[in-house]
Image (tube, rainbow, N blue to C red):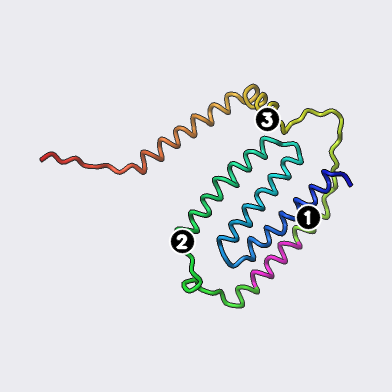
Amino acid sequence: MSLVEICFWALSFVTLVCALMTVLSKNPIFSAIYLLICFASIAGHYLLLNAQFLFIVHIIVYSGAIMVLFLTTLMLMNLNEETEKHKPAIARIGAVVAACILGLVLVSAISKTALVLPQNSGAVDIGAIKVLGKILLNEYFYPFEFISILLLTAMVGAVLLTKKEHKITIK
């Protein structure tokens, strides 16, 4: 077994354990921490695939921005065990049955797929930032610029829609 395979299996184990702990943890803050570790291990998979750009974007977007959003939401909700309604037993059993059915569907779908191993035929390093930048700013220059103008327009529109008008009264 090579070092890459050992890293893959270790990251996969950490991802699965943290995903389970995210769902099974009773404290929402601990769930968010487990989710953060899960995001970091998924980013490690991107690094193993030699996709440095996706690795960095995943760390910045998911581990940074999304987790800040989750934690802010958790803090604003002020979850207490006394105020939290407990689900009836039938709802818990239904959730377990639905999760088991979903797991069986996923296992059957994965078992029917063919294993494709990467070929080392001197292919271009598609995940590298330099290659991605060249493709993005050469072949997809106009769509890239159009999306940036569209996002700028949407941002200005959102600011204008949420802006409250203040009436100035002169005495």
166 or 100: nearer the eye? 166
Query: Which residue is found at the position 67% from the left and 67% from the top?
Result: 98
Amino acid type of the residue tagged 3 in the rendering: Ile
Q: CA distance from mark 1 to mark 3?
A: 33 Å
What secondary structure is the magenta-colored segment mainly? helix
Query: Which residue is found at the position 33% from the left and 42% from the top?
Result: 163
Residue under label 1, please give it: 109
Residue under label 3, please give it: 129
Q: Quadrant of the C terminus?
A: top left
Give percent across and percent down for residue 52.
69, 36
The segment highlighted magenta reads 94-104
Amino acid type of the residue tagged 2 in the rendering: Met
- The numbered dot on residue 77 is 2
Quarter of the image holding residue 50? Answer: top right
Query: Which residue is found at the position 52% from the left and 30% from the top?
Result: 148
Mark found first going from the N terminus, 2 or 3: 2
